């Protein structure tokens, strides 16, 4: 069964221009790499860290969400895939999709662990309104730690503990430098007033990350023709077994497998990558089959932590 799963995984990627876990290609032009640092949910699954995705372009890494365990997951990915840009001191730019705890409880880890491990510059942090207040409170919470490290015997970078926050406003083009463009994409996520997906463009390639979202027209528009669409999903079969109060919640905040099939059929990404999977007794194979049964036959992978996808 394991052999068949690996073969299926490889077949999904054939013809998409995407290579899985391949760092051996010509590096004269920086590769665009997608690394699944965490594919989990609030459920305490030991095999899946909280939601966090890295996009790497050459020697630069861009982090999307900060689920629990993010710095160690980045270190594991750096070692497994030989990606220096995911070393702790290189985690310098991050984007929050929204402020739910499962997407942000790793933020103090990202701020302070990376600093202790010699990040020399402040963390550049983009996010919705409320991000600045969150960073301010975290800085206050760790003020004694920062004071001791800066003024005690331990050598410390004087600027690395700081956070440079940009809250998303009317301008959704957040970054455009060094051949990399990153745009915030407004999405619908239940009663959150602000929630965003992100579109990353580099080397004529595009990766779109949904964050947490129910069916969102602007996300579909942004993902149309993308090389990779990373999208959250829940199982239709598992949903049917949930209590009505939870069904009401999930239908408002998240996207079912059948809904995602319709999204993918409209957007037509070259590769659809599932993350933040809510299984409720189902499996990765079941999620894929639900999407297939709903009419989507494009390239499709249900991701696991530390999966790597490379666009050349």
Image: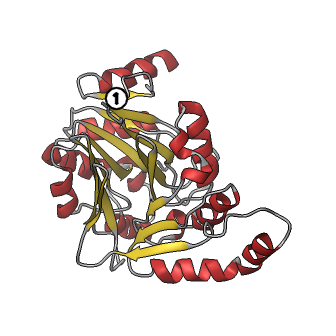
Viewer-side residue, 57 vs 151? 151
Name which residue lies at 58% across and 72% down.
162
Name which residue lies at 62% across and 77% down.
138
Residue 45, can we see it?
no
Q: Split into 4 quadrants, where in the image is the C terminus? A: top left
Q: To which quarter of the image does residue 13 belong?
A: top left
The percent coordinates of residue 153 (x first, y second) are: 86, 66
The percent coordinates of residue 31 (x first, y second) are: 36, 35
Q: Secondary structure at mark 1?
A: loop
Q: To which quarter of the image does residue 298 belong?
A: top left
Q: Is residue 164 above or below residue 197?
A: below
Tell whether 167 sits left or right of 204. right
Q: Which residue is mark 1?
A: 28
* Outermost residue, right side: 153
Name which residue lies at 19% across and 38% down.
295
Residue 148, can we see it?
yes
The percent coordinates of residue 259 (x first, y second) are: 24, 52
Q: To which quarter of the image does residue 299 belong?
A: top left
Tell whether 312 sits left or right of 106. left
Q: Is residue 36 above or below residue 91?
A: above
The percent coordinates of residue 12 (x first, y second) are: 31, 26
Tell whether 131 sits left or right of 190. right
Residue count near mark 1 (Cα–Cα under 10 Å), binned few <14, some 14–19, many ≥20: few
Name which residue lies at 60% across and 65% down.
111
């Amino acid at each position: 069964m394991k052999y068949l799963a690996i073969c299926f995984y490889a077949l999904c990627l054939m013809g998409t221009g995407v290579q899985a876990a391949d760092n051996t290609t010509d590096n004269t032009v920086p590769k665009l790499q997608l690394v699944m640092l965490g594919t989990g949910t609030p459920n305490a699954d030991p095999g899946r860290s909280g939601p966090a995705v890295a996009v790497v372009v050459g020697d630069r890494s861009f982090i999307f969400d900060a689920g629990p365990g993010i710095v160690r997951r980045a270190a594991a990915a750096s070692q497994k895939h030989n990606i220096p840009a995911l070393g702790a001191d290189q985690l310098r730019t991050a984007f929050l999709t929204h402020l739910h705890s499962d997407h942000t409880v790793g933020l103090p880890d990202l701020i302070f662990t990376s600093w202790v491990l010699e990040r020399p510059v402040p963390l550049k942090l983009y996010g919705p309104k409320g991000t600045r207040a969150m960073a301010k409170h975290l800085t206050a919470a760790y003020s004694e730690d920062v004071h001791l490290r800066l003024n005690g015997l331990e050598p410390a970078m004087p600027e690395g503990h700081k956070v440079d926050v940009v809250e998303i406003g009317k301008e959704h083009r957040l970054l455009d430098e060094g051949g990399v463009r990153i745009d915030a994409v407004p999405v619908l996520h239940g009663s959150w007033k602000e929630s965003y997906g992100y579109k990353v463009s580099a080397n004529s390639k595009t990766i779109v990350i949904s964050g947490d979202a129910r069916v969102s027209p602007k996300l579909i528009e942004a993902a149309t023709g993308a090389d990779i669409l990373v999208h959250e999903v829940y199982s239709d079969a598992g949903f049917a077994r949930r209590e009505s109060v939870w069904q009401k919640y999930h239908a408002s905040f998240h996207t079912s497998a059948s809904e995602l099939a319709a999204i993918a059929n409209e957007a037509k990404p070259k590769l659809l990558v599932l993350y933040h999977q809510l299984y409720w007794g189902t499996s990765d194979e079941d999620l894929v089959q639900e999407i297939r049964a709903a009419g989507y036959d494009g390239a499709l992978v249900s991701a696991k932590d530390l999966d790597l996808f490379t666009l050349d």
